[in-house]
Structure formats: C-alpha cells, structure tokens
Amino acid sequence: MTDDSRCREVSATRLEDQLTLLEVEGDLPSANGRIPLEACRTHRQDFLDLVDRVSKRAGEVADDFDSRALIVRTLLHLPRVAGSAGVLTRRQVDAELRRSARQLLKDQENVRHWVPTEDLELDEVTFVAGEKSASAEIFDRLHYLRNSRAGAVNYALVDSAGRPVTLCSVSPLEWMRVGKQITKQFDVPMEAVRDISRVYSFNSAPPNAISYLLSRVRNHIRKTSPEVQLLSTAVDPNLGFTGTSYLAANWHRWMTIKARPYMYFDGGYVTPRQLRTRFGTTNVALLQSTYRRRFEVSSVNLMDSMIFFNRIKGSTEYVSPDRQRRLYR
C-alpha cells in the first residue's frame, strides 16, 4: 500500500468514526410535530431550525460544512417519505437531514483537494472555458444529483491555484418537448440551443458569481460557436430554487413543464438517464415489479419546472405569463 493510499484509508476511518455524531437522534422537541413539504421548500423557520441543528453537528466533523447543499439534498429526498399528502413529521425531516449530512460530509472529504480555502472577490478569479481537471469530479460528488453530464463542456471561475469556485456544464439540448416548443414559438431550431445542465458554487465564491459566470459563458459561446442562438436551463422550485441568478444575468422564463415524480433506488435519487444507463429502462411499473422496495417513486404533487432562456446575440425578450406554455412530458 502506498503512503497516499494509507493516508486516505486512515482519513476515511477517522471520518466514519466522526460521523457517529449524526447517528444519534438526541433530544428533538416535538419530534412528531407536523411540517408540510411546502414549508421545507420555502425555508420556513421550523424547517431551518432542524437544518441548523444538524449543521451544527456536522460542523463538529468539518468546519466548512455546506448547509446550503444540505438543504437542497434533503429537499430532493423528502418527497420519498412525504406521502401523497405532502406532510412530514419533524422526526422524518430530521432523519433525512442527518442521512443527507452523512453523505455530504463523505463527498466533501473525497474532493477535499479541490475545495477553495478562502473567500474570494470577482477580481480574484479567472474564467476558464473547457475546464477538465476538476469539473467532473466536483459534479459527481458535490452537485445534488451527484452525476456529471457526459460529453458536456465545462466552464469555471477558478482561484489562483486553479481550483474552481463556481462552475457549470453546457450540453446540447436533448429535451425534445422543449426543443419543439422553441422552434414552434420562437423559430429557433433545437440544434441551435445549448443547455446549462449543471451548476455548482462553493461557499467561498464571490457574490453574484453564478450570474457572472453565465455572462462569461454566453460571451464565449457567441465568439466561438456562431451556430448557437440560445441558452436554456431548467429550474426546479421543489428544491427551493427560484432562478434569481439567471434573472440577474438577463435570462427570462419562457415556459414551464409538468414535473415528473422523483425516483429513488436503494434510498438514493436517480435520474431517468441513470436508470436507462443502469437498467436499460425507465418503465416505472417494470422497475417496481422487478426491484420492489428497492425502487421507489414519490407520490406527492410536485411543482412544475421553470424553463429559462438567454439569447446569445441581443437582448432576451420578456414573455408574459399568459404566453408561457405549460408543457407535458
């Protein structure tokens, strides 16, 4: 065994020992009190109190624990236990927070070498197009989907050591329903659209780093890819996202799309793309009959995804809500 391998093994063992802090439920006032899923999505104080409680425990393991990432990861998994009524007990929310915190701490430890060490200002970061050294590893570990997009072009704002502080992936638009609507309503062919498929920003990133990165990406694509006319992205309000960074970069919402239920395998969220890769199908009935309790589907009503756009050349027009089409999957 090499010295590096031995150090990683010791570090992993120490982390597992420390993670026992998150195993014990401890005192939980009104453990059976009810919290609607909507209250968690909108960051109501009773939910934030539980987040703070778990974050303080996790902070004893890692002083740079990311409570924002904990909230998003937990919101991704709460629909699995919320039931069709969309109401949870405080005990259920606390259990999912602790479960998500354990995984997040492990993920942070696995990419410790890429974590920026100090807060930065915008004039202290450098824009990098086609970033290859860190992006895939960061998206696989720290993005809430824990899955980088294969074949994507990655862009980043990096510190003086070359570590990304804010990054995004750009992929060809593959969402056929969105592509058809764009062509029909705005006369933009689907092949002329690029999708912001992943975004991640560290706590140390400068204020407005995401909107600044999006603007730099737009400028770079305009100069290097004249065939591209439009950028798109999907914003999921079920995870507490509102699209503020996109609005700040002069994007606009042009349509919404009906949410599909969240799907989980062995308690972890899985995307349709991951299901196709792993099992060769996204057929819910088949997966449920084959894997029974291992494959789960949320039953609570989810809010529509918001689809934002940004024109590569010129200003992006505002589309009034009455002209925004609601698409169905």
Image: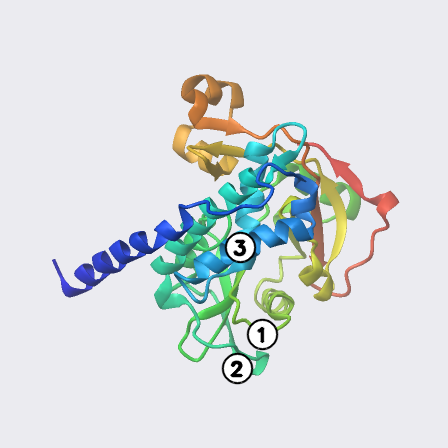
Look at the image and tell me whether residue 105 can be seen: yes
Quarter location, residue 123? bottom right
Residue visible at 42% across and 71% down in the picture: 163
Q: Tell me whether the residue at label 2 lies in contact with that at label 3, contact meaning CB atoms closer than 8 angstroms.
A: no
Q: Secondary structure at mark 1?
A: loop
Which label sits on residue 206?
A: 1
Q: Tell me whether the residue at label 2 lies in contact with that at label 1, contact meaning CB atoms closer than 8 angstroms.
A: yes
Write down the residue under mark 2.
124
Write down the residue under mark 3.
53
Residues packed near mark 2 inside 10 Å, few (<14), some (14 to 19) or many (20 plus):
few
Q: Amino acid at mark 3?
A: Arg
Residue 283, compared with residue 124, is above or below; it is above
Q: Secondary structure at mark 2?
A: helix
Residue visible at 42% across and 32% down in the picture: 266
Residue 324, compared with residue 130, is above or below; it is above
Q: Position of residue 10 (x, y in %)?
A: 22, 59
